[in-house]
Amino acid sequence: KSHKVFETRVLDIRVSNGSILAPMSMSVVVPTYNREVDLKECLDSLLAQTKLPAEIVVIDDGELCEEYVRDRIRECEGRGLRFVYYRKDHSVERRGLSESKNRALLLVTEPIVCFFDDDVVLEKDCLEKMSAVWDEISDQKLIGVGGMISNNRKQGSCEKIFGKLFCLDGQSAWDVTDVGFQVWDESIKERTKGHYTHGGVTSYRTDFVRRLKFATFDGG
């Protein structure tokens, strides 16, 4: 099967007072694999954002039906978004999340790209908050802005004590130690610097990840 690409573009959408709702200079990528219900909930939460992205790119590692894809296109058209659907051709393209992300990097057009897992449901102001960090911080060393997963497992007291006893704490709330131990803290409430984030809720400088690319592994 050859890959399939559907794409639409609506230049602007007017709200009730006649003003133009301009999208942010941000692309959103959602890699997916046979999760139609979860994917729709994810896309619905994207379309309900207080500030919309300029485009949404879905990379399909499975086989979403064309009617399902057409419905998602119409929904994005109604909100004035560019929507790109790309189904991978497994006769020439490898399966896998990293491969899907790297394919998406060839399709996005905005300076900031967000990657979301297909089972993520976003708070309504998620993209607005991410965009605000990019707007406020000009440091070129900032390569990513991540979000928290509110219903993810929290570290227990015993884990925290264990980390301190065996010197496994990092220099920040989100860190990777010299021995490769990942340190995280889902309980933080304020914006904080870290050295990694959730891969499924993170935005990056597009030019940076295009140069670096996502690591792939044998077997996808």
Image (cartoon, rainbow, N blue to C red):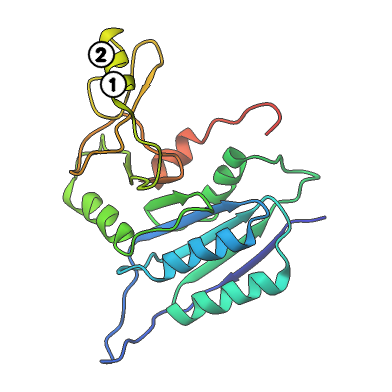
* Left or right of 159 in this view: 32: right
* Contact, mark 1 vs mark 2 (Cβ under 8 Å): yes
Question: In the picture shown, does residue 24 fall above or below 162?
Answer: below
Q: Residue sitting at 51 percent across and 64 percent down?
A: 41
Q: Looking at this view, is 124 or 85 the one in front?
A: 124
Question: In the picture shown, does residue 55 fall above or below 166?
Answer: below
Q: Secondary structure at mark 2?
A: helix
Amino acid of disc 1: Lys
Whole-angstrom CA distance, mark 1 to mark 2, is 6 Å
Q: Residue sitting at 45 percent across and 72 percent down?
A: 81
Q: Position of residue 53 (x, y in %)?
A: 38, 64
Categorize mark 2 by other alpha carbons within 10 Å: few (<14), some (14-19), many (20+): few
Residue located beneath label 2 in the image:
164
Amino acid of disc 2: Lys
* Left or right of 218 in this view: 135: left
Q: Quadrant of residue 155?
A: top left
* Left or right of 13 in this view: 160: left
Q: Looking at this view, is 14 or 149 the one in front?
A: 149
Residue located beneath label 1 in the image:
160
Position of the C terminus by quadrant = top right
Q: Quadrant of residue 7?
A: bottom right
Q: Secondary structure at mark 1?
A: helix
